[in-house]
Amino acid sequence: MDVTVIGTGRMGSALVRRLANQGFTVYAWNRTRDKLKGLPARALDDVSQARGLVFIFVSDDDALNMVIKGISGDVIALAGTYSVAAIRALSTRLIGSNVGLLATPVIGGPGDVEKGSAIYLVGGAEVVYNKVKDVFDKLGTIIRLPTAESAMALKLAYNALLIGSMALLGEYVNLGRTYGVDNETLKDLLRRTAFKDIADKYLDRIISPKAPPSFTLSLAAKDVHYAVKSAGDAKTPMVVSSAVKALYELLSALGLGNEDYVRAGILELEGFGKNNAY
């Protein structure tokens, strides 16, 4: 089956490589054509040339609305993170067409996508999913959801949980350090508790980052914004996530948007300063 990837940033590029390694014929389009160089895919001049199963990995609702207008293909798979309202609007637009729709947001980073260890939250009609199941079987772990909206809502809920947890982990480090607790003791405590796995995966990255971020603070702000917006549309309160949203948006406004999202809590000191935190 032909597969098209629309949007070849870090995640989209990783998906192209995964698909090609699994033997699929892959086509790709990106607004900035330089990002197509070196990828094992046939470059498309326009989204109207998309074919087969079409993964969309663009950055946000606005970019999604831009590319979807002229897109072609048999089944559209929304692999990026978008608001539930955007999914609902697209579902309505496709009623009566021959194009199937799935929401397929990804849990994991580019490395997970390329290795086949990512989790795909796949929401949509069973008849649509069955048309492309052979492709998803070679991508990673699949969790099926009944609708595209429910898949995207679960992705937003997960991201809000993860992003909020990173902010609190940074504040844990800040408070401990303020009162003389060294980094090794901060790590040791968490590794003896229910937070062991989180400490092993994220604490060094928070305290002493060594690699460029695969997911930035500004992107995290966008995702929490969509989570809070989607909850508000359904009249479901997200009080804690609203506070996390405000923190990430403020840090982005202070020029820290390109930092690793896991460092938000620890960057409070840099962004606000000890004497002006409140």
Image (spheres, rainbow, N blue to C red):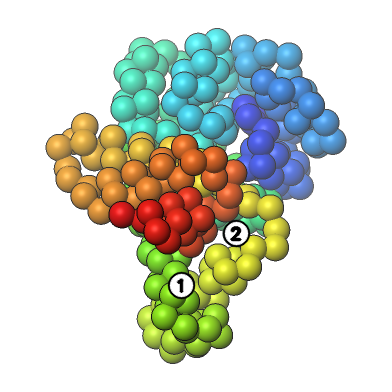
Element at label 2: loop
Residue at 39 percent across and 85 percent down: it is 193
Image quadrant assignment for residue 93: top left
Q: Which mark is on residue 222? A: none
Q: Is residue 84 left or right of residue 102?
A: left
| Residue density around tag 2, few if under 14, some if 14–19, many if 20 or more, within 10 Å | some
Residue at 70 percent across and 63 percent down: it is 210
Expressed as whole percent of the image width and height from the top left, the position of residue 174 reads 44, 69
Residue at 28 percent across and 35 percent down: it is 229
Considering only vertical position in the picture, is 137 above or below 174?
above
Element at label 1: helix
Considering only vertical position in the picture, is 216 above or below 101?
below
Relative depth, front residue between 163 and 272: 272
Residue at 33 percent across and 33 percent down: it is 84
**Residues at circles 2 and 1 in contact by the CB criterion of under 8 Å:** no
Residue under pointer 2: 117
Expressed as whole percent of the image width and height from the top left, the position of residue 63 reads 52, 22
**Residue type of the residue flagged with mark 1:** Val
Q: Is residue 74 left or right of residue 7?
A: left
Q: Which mark is on residue 173? A: 1
Expressed as whole percent of the image width and height from the top left, the position of residue 140 reads 57, 54
Mark nearest the camera among 2 and 1 is 1
Q: Which residue, as the protein is rendered here, is positioned at the far front?
A: 275
Name the image quarter holding the C terminus.
bottom left
| Residue density around tag 1, few if under 14, some if 14–19, many if 20 or more, within 10 Å | many
**Residue type of the residue flagged with mark 2:** Ser
Expressed as whole percent of the image width and height from the top left, the position of residue 2 reads 67, 29
Relative depth, front residue between 25 and 193: 193
Residue 278 visible from this viewpoint: yes
